[in-house]
Image (tube, rainbow, N blue to C red):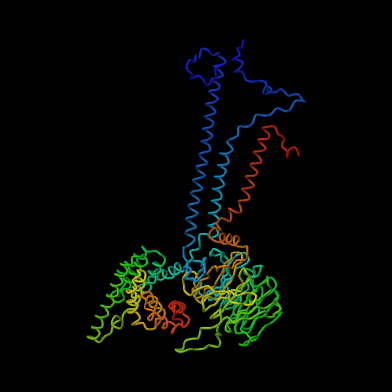
Amino acid sequence: MTDAHDGAKPGFDPSDLTKEEVQRRVEALLAESSEKEQKAETRRKRLIPAVILVLLLLLLGGVAAFVYRVLSPNAGADKKEAAGVTWVRSIYGFGPAENQQFVNPNDAVTAPDGTIWVADTARSRVVAFRGDGTYAGSMLRGSQNTGEPFRLPSRLAVDPDGLVYIADIPNEQLTIMDGQTKLVAANIPGLTSVDVNDQLIVVGSNSGFAILDKDGKVKKIVGKNGQGDNDFDRVAGVAIDSASKTIYVVDTYNNRLSAWDFDGKRKWIVTTGNKANKVKLQGGGSLVTTTSVPAALQLPADVAIDGKGRPIVLDSFGFQLAAFDPKDGAFIGSWGAPGDKDGQFMYPATVNYDASKDWFVVADTSNRRAEIIRLPGTARDGSGVVSALNRLLAGPLRALWPCLALLPLIVIALLFSRWRARRAANNEEGVEDPVEAA
Amino acid sequence: MSTPSDEALQPDVTEAPPTGVQPAATEPAPRLPARPAGDPIARTLWLGIAFVVILALVTVAYSLLTNVLGTGAPRTMAEYKLSATRAKIDAGSKERKDWMNYILALTDDGQYQVAQDWIDRGKRTLKGQDVSADMVYMQANLYAAQGKLDLALKTADVGLSTIQKTHDKAVVEWKRTGVPTEASIGLSDNFWEILLLKAEVYEQKKDWKGARSAYDRYLAEKKTAASVFAQRAAVKEKLKDVKGAAADYRTTLRFIPDNADALAGLKRIGAAK
């Protein structure tokens, strides 16, 4: 029998075929043509959405890249100008108007949820910002006239429950705020600084520091005002390291850093520079600032603990951050330079570390800003990728949060539709659905 | 009578029972013909488009609701300076210092065309340009920022000679009339700023002699400009004038004992002790 496909062969005579064969051939040709048409139709049906999807993704990608570029200003002093400090971003206020910007931000701390609270002292307010520097919608307002709930917020601390502790230095008052509600205010003579963890409150003063429990009951008072080994002259910064159960104390005018256990016993003490309360002059009336002390700090003003558990001391008049060994207080290194460029400092007041993002928030007072910066080698071991991801999602990319939240839903929807398709296919093939059978 | 071909065209009645005829209880239930389904791949693609559109809309809505796009507050020092100086200009200030600060902020922020517009506007509207040459200084600074170094030097020279000529003329007039004016009392501060700008432009051009000459002129008048002594010392280092560089670094240290540039410079040239 002649094959349907050899119709073009020379010597082919259609009259040789029976009616049945002709019909079969016609049907085969029709089926082939229909199959081709169907394939073309299927291709067309797939091509249109595929092209739309690709164009849509390209368009969205382009728009996202453009918006990200606009929202991430290419600023920051170069490495040499910033002396090793990497600038992330700065916060100058919560709006474009003059009265929405900081006058003299005295402290900036990070809450457990990533909110950055900035004390704008002269305007009697504490303002909440997100990690990308935008206003988070919360503001605690004080009053310089009535002092309620606070007068001049100078130092801040946030406990693991998100309560904000406000040291009102001119008022010598420690005020605790839960949102807009004032919980308690304690009068502490010569109050200068505060830090808090889940068990303790540590407050610094002009003549030492005190360890309190979370109810405000004094557990231990350490020191008296003076220049001796056991004395203090303005504790401008305290930091609690819960992991090693250590309290770090910056003795500003004595230019010293010391470490204490939670019972108030000293672990070590180091001199970090020339005493500011025993000024020496040299020819021409200049201050003697040269020193044999390796850290050579000019005026230590605050301390924070980095991811490696090292105390990082802010040198307000040296415009730098210095790292010390938590075991013995040995000087490790310092970073930072004076100036108003992004990443530089001008008489900064405080420093705070956010371990989840491996960055520091510095109250750069004279530059009227809170600066988010990074230092080399401060991340907790093995947390580099996580903190990098956290930093990304704390920036403009936080716009992707809803997408990330919806992603599990999309995956579930896809899995469900696949399961349904498989079930339908099984039904067609007559395979018993195990679920239905059950 | 039906032919075989006629039979072939008849529907296959054995495939489905006639309507109303119930199958025997022992026979399996007849399978309904599968509903013609669309292409699953095409359906998935359309579904993907819908997801992408929904996610994009959700992202935009979230961004708008939570200020991802910002609150208009400055984010960098350049933006902060712009915002602070712009406020004064918007308030209608005609103070030349306010205009200069605004134009400097625009230049620092890289908004060169806007800076140029304000320089042109300032030339037309600000008084006393012959005394202080503010806009010429701003123009030279703008050229330097744009990397047009030769133009910056030429414009700086125009600024210096304008201030000098006006001052000289005013001094003659003062002597004649006995009445002092702003221009006769002394050279405008801009004169010294322009000299520093010239020195920095020469440094960018690696014309060390030109830079030294500009610094010499500046320091001949400003004898306590500690950090400028360190800048001149660095230029002297380039000119292999080690003795001169050491002297300048030491002058800086006389005013600022721990000046990092001076200490590093002395160490570099081996004169630290």
The image quadrant that residue A230 belongs to is: bottom right
x 61%, y 70%: residue: A306
Q: Position of residue B273 (x, y in %)?
A: 46, 83
The correct choice, above or below, for A191 with respect to A436 in the image is below
The N terminus of chain A: image quadrant: top right
Q: Position of residue A59 (x, y in %)?
A: 48, 49
The image quadrant that residue B147 belongs to is: bottom left
Towards the viewer: B223 or B171: B223
Towards the viewer: A271 or B28: A271
Q: How many marks?
A: 0
Query: What is the residue that sits farthest to the front in this orientation?
Result: B270
Q: Position of residue A92 (x, y in %)?
A: 50, 69
Q: Position of residue A409 (x, y in %)?
A: 63, 49
Query: What is the residue that sits farthest to the left in this orientation?
Result: B176
The C terminus of chain A: image quadrant: top right
Towards the viewer: B237 or A401: B237
